[in-house]
Image (cartoon, rainbow, N blue to C red):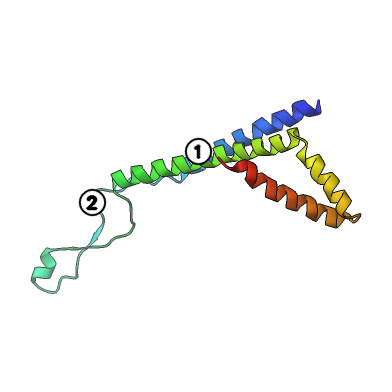
Amino acid sequence: MKRIAFLFVLLLVPILFTEMSLRASAQSAPGAVPSNPPSVASPSSGTSSAQSKPETRITAYTLPPDLYRKAHNRGRINFATRIAGFFYGLLVLWFILLRRLSAKFRDWAEKVSRFRFVQAIVFTLLLVLTIPFFSFP
């Protein structure tokens, strides 16, 4: 029963994370930009050449469509890379458990000291040094 619950949580968490991330990215998409930005006319104090050309005030900056498309695609690639990296990290941790390296690290830490705090430091140090070794592509 514990194994089924663990597998359920292992599958549910990434699905919920992905769904929430997609909802957040959909809500933060920029709205339609009006084709004619609002303009502010200069005060009328007679006839001059400055009055014939109204001033335009820039209220917001938006990327041109081609650059926006590139930025959006790059964001999607970055998101997919992070998700793949998360699952690869889980795979590395699962491999460490499968090969019983964590039990060996625990035994080594117990041989080093009888104090639990020192054992935790030694175990963590060994684990932190092992994970990058297996995370190489």
Label 2 sits on residue:
36
Q: Is residue 112 above or below residue 76?
A: below
Q: Residue furthest right?
A: 114
Q: Residue furthest bottom?
A: 45
Label 2 and label 1: CA atoms lie apart by 36 Å
Residue 4 appears left or right of 109: left
Residue 80 appears left or right of 53: right
Which dot marks residue 13? none
Disc 2 marks a residue whose amino acid type is Asn
Disc 1 marks a residue whose amino acid type is Ala
In percent of width and height, residue 111 lies at 88, 50
Label 1 sits on residue:
80
Image point 71% across, 29% down: which residue? Answer: 7
Q: Quadrant of the N terminus?
A: top right
| Mark 1 neighbour density, 10 Å: few (under 14) some (14–19) many (20 or more) | few
Closer to the camera in the image, 43 or 8: 8
In percent of width and height, residue 65 lies at 29, 44
Secondary structure beneath disc 2? loop
Secondary structure beneath disc 1? helix
Image point 69% across, 50% down: which residue? Answer: 129
Q: Nearer the viewer, mark 2 or mark 1?
A: 1
Q: Is residue 62 visible?
A: yes
Q: Quadrant of the C terminus?
A: top right
In percent of width and height, residue 45 lies at 14, 74
Image point 65% across, 32% down: which residue? Answer: 12
